[in-house]
Amino acid sequence: MRNVLAVCAIAIAITSGASHAAEPKPVPAETQSAVAATQSQLDKLFAELKRERNPQAADRISRRIWDEWYKSGSASIDLMMEWSNDAVQAQKFDVALDFLDQVVTLQPEFAEGWNRRATVHFLMRQFGKSMADIERALELEPRHFGALSGMAQIMKETGRRELALRAWQRVIDIYPMMRSAQDEIATLSEELAGESI
């Protein structure tokens, strides 16, 4: 029953494209200026990404967005993120989760911490936990095309192709030239059209 309710909630979120408003939490003083600078830079980059029609140029812009997302404003958080990445590369997912649990506890407003933890849960095929972290990342950064891509992959892996298609369409709204999203939309649209014949 909980799974059915969770799927319904996800379907509503994907269909509406709306994120739930979270209670504002105080941002530590040492990160406030970094957050403001990052947000301003992200706004500019997302505007460029939406207008860009050259795939290579769009890819460069997306990499700059990822660079901004990685900025936590805290040297200790950055170090734990690096350690978690090293653990993932070594396929020590439990170790990676230990670091990422600390990241999201110490800096709950850092969207990339939630997204990274969602990725590790996905790699461990813990789709429910991954989805919960994706939802939190999207509350903090609704334009997070990486988190939306993860959502789409989970929907596809769990046989919910129509929801996967909607999630990929949300990705394209943000990052029109993302080739993997374009390919997934084409494939899923064809598969779903074939089912309706």
Image (spheres, grey):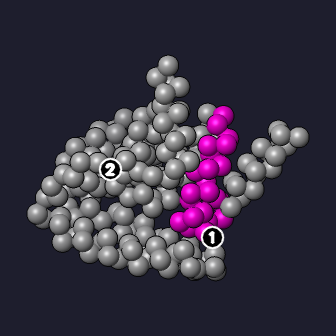
From this viewpoint, is residue 147 visible?
Answer: yes
- In the image, is residue 118 above or below residue 82? above
Q: Please tell me which of labels 1 and 2 falls first in the chain.
A: 2
Nearest the eye: 84 or 172 = 172
**Residue 46, image x and y in percent?**
46, 73
- The type of residue carrying mark 2 is Ala
Residue bearing the label numbered 2: 21
Please tell me which residue is depicted at 58% across the width and 50% down the height of the picture: 167
Residue 161 image point, x, y percent? 67, 41
In the image, is 74 to the left or to the right of 133? left
Bounds of the magenta segment: 159-181
Would residue 11 appear left or right of 40 to someone viewing this image? right
Q: Which residue carries the number 1 mark?
A: 177
- Residue appearing at x 35%, y 42% in the figure: 96
Q: Main secondary structure of the magenta part?
A: helix
* For residue 96, above or below residue 38: above
What is the x, y in percent for residue 76? 19, 56
Q: Does the magenta stretch include residue 155?
A: no
Gap in angstroms between the C-alphas marked 1 and 2: 29 Å
